[in-house]
Amino acid sequence: MSLRDHSVPGLTKLADQEQEQLDELTNAYRDRFGFPLIMCLRERPHLQAVLDHGAQRLHNAPAYECHAAALEVARIAEYRFGDLVATEARPKDEALRRNSVSSPSSPDAQTR
């Protein structure tokens, strides 16, 4: 992940205990699903939101989580592409709101 993405929820300056919490979550996720936890950090305003969302995703079925991870990749790509093409006439946040990719946090969530 980029430094910009990490800095949004403050993940570049974690206390030791916070880093341990994040490490425990990412290790548990990798153990359960076999791939790293992928999350669009720009949509999580702080560490607790990251931890809560990741913990919630640990309860997903593996097939569902593979889909959820792919949607997170799309969201990350959408933000980064928006950063590249943003102009004064078309601010990046406006473009993202119009074409937002939905990422459900559980199988019961509605999809578009």
Image (cartoon, helix red, strand yellow):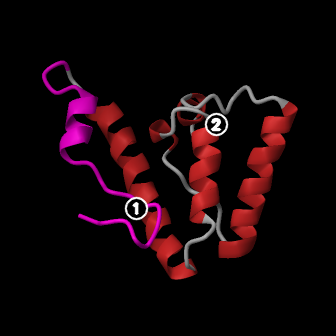
The amino acid type, in three-letter code, at marker 1 is Pro
Q: Residue 36 carries which label?
A: none
Give percent across and percent down for residue 37: 62, 58
Q: Which residue lies furthest to the front in this view?
A: 108
Which image quadrant: the N terminus? top right
Which image quadrant: the C terminus? bottom left
Dot 2 falls on a residue whose secondary structure is helix
Give percent across and percent down for residue 89: 13, 22
Give percent across and percent down for residue 99: 21, 48
The amino acid type, in three-letter code, at marker 2 is Leu
Give the camera-side residue of 107 and 89: 107
Residue 92 shown left or right of residue 14 in the figure: left
Q: Most prominent secondary structure in the magenta stretch?
A: loop
Q: Residue 47 carries which label?
A: 2
Q: Residue furthest top?
A: 88
Q: Which of marks 2 and 1 is nearer the N terminus?
A: 2
Figure check: 74 above or below 96: below
Residue beneath the point at 33% across and 41% down: 81
Residue beneath the point at 56% across and 52% down: 53
Q: Name the residue under label 1.
A: 104
Please state the extent of the stretch shown in magenta in the rendering.
88-112
